[in-house]
Amino acid sequence: MAEVHNLKRDTAKLPKPDWIRVKAPVSREYHATRDIIHGLRLNTVCEEAACPNIGECWSKKHATVMIMGDTCTRACAFCNVKTGVPGQLNPHEPDNLAEAVAKLGLSHVVVTSVDRDDLPDGGAAHFAECITRMRARAPGTTIEVLTPDFLRKEHAIPVVVAARPDVYNHNIETVPRLYKAVRPGARYFNSLHLLKTVKELDPSIFTKSGLMVGLGESKDEVLQVMDDLRAAEVDFITIGQYLQPTPAHAAVERYVTPDEFEYYARMAKAKGFLMVSASPLTRSSYHAGEGFEIMRKAREEKLANG
């Protein structure tokens, strides 16, 4: 398949199909969640990345909190989070996050961050402190972290693992051929190595990774990424449609059909993933709590059956 060209063309002429459309958020619960998040001065990837599921998730008091500021040190072609020089870490953020989790009464929380290549540990200690504070304030809440790749900071990974999140998520994002154009600041095999390292350090932690489609990848390439993730012992894979945030971002080459997503889901299950979420609107943290429970039960059944 040919390389992706003209990454920054506007895809306004490529109309969104009916299966990708969502309703605007209007519910009372949505506004209540927003008020708690904003009141504690927390950032969310839901807003910063313009997630299409924000109305549904916030109405259910589900939110993916983005720590360490709203400015990323990288400029990935798919991401709507702003790029620049980040500010200092907020020392009160771990406590504010723990308070938000307690106020929202979350059974499962997802915590992600911007890339902080400016920090010696990439922000690993800050992630660990957030986990510790949430455990103390909301002991019944299961915790999922979605971390950067900690490129050239391998000493950072054990710091996060030692804090023992229930799920360690790191997104592979796209197929290796498209990395230079779509994710130029990252390295495909470094991301695989991170996921494998988490399992080596603590096999009890579930690992998870996500993939965007619609950027020009082939089916065979997607299947190869699945094989690579399974070789790294990843438990949970998410596959969703890439949506172009602005005309300045990578273009949508095509809208993948629901039937194709069902095919990917079947193949992923056949390859041994404990949990698979594959649909046009799937995002890394979409229905994360429900996915965690399914994955946990799948592991229990697998162990029971030898």
Image: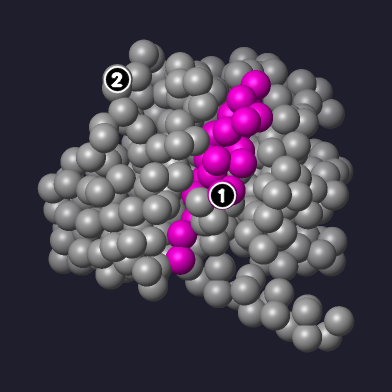
Magenta stretch, residue numbers: 142-162
What's under tag 1, amino acid-wise?
Ala
Can residue 31 be seen?
yes
Residue situated in front as seen by the camera: 56 or 61: 61
Residue situated in front as seen by the camera: 119 or 67: 119
- Report crowding for label 1: few under 14, some 14 to 19, many 20 or more residues within 10 A (C-alpha): few
Question: Residue 65: x, y in percent?
Answer: 35, 47
Task: Determine the residue positioned at 35% across, 33% down.
Answer: 68
Badge number at residue 162:
1
Question: Residue 268: x, y in percent?
Answer: 77, 60
Count of numbered marks: 2
Can residue 12 be seen?
no
Task: Determine the residue positioned at 44% across, 42% down.
Answer: 127
Question: Residue 109: x, y in percent?
Answer: 40, 59
Residue situated in front as seen by the camera: 20 or 52: 52
Question: Measured along the vertical axis of the image, is residue 86 above or below residue 136?
Answer: above
Task: Determine the residue positioned at 82% across, 39% down.
Answer: 221
Residue 294 in which image quadrant:
bottom right
What's under tag 2, amino acid-wise?
Gly
Question: Residue 24: x, y in percent?
Answer: 28, 54
Badge number at residue 87:
2
Tell me the element at label 2: loop
Task: Indicate whether residue 159 is drawn in magenta.
Answer: yes
Residue 114 in which image quadrant:
top left
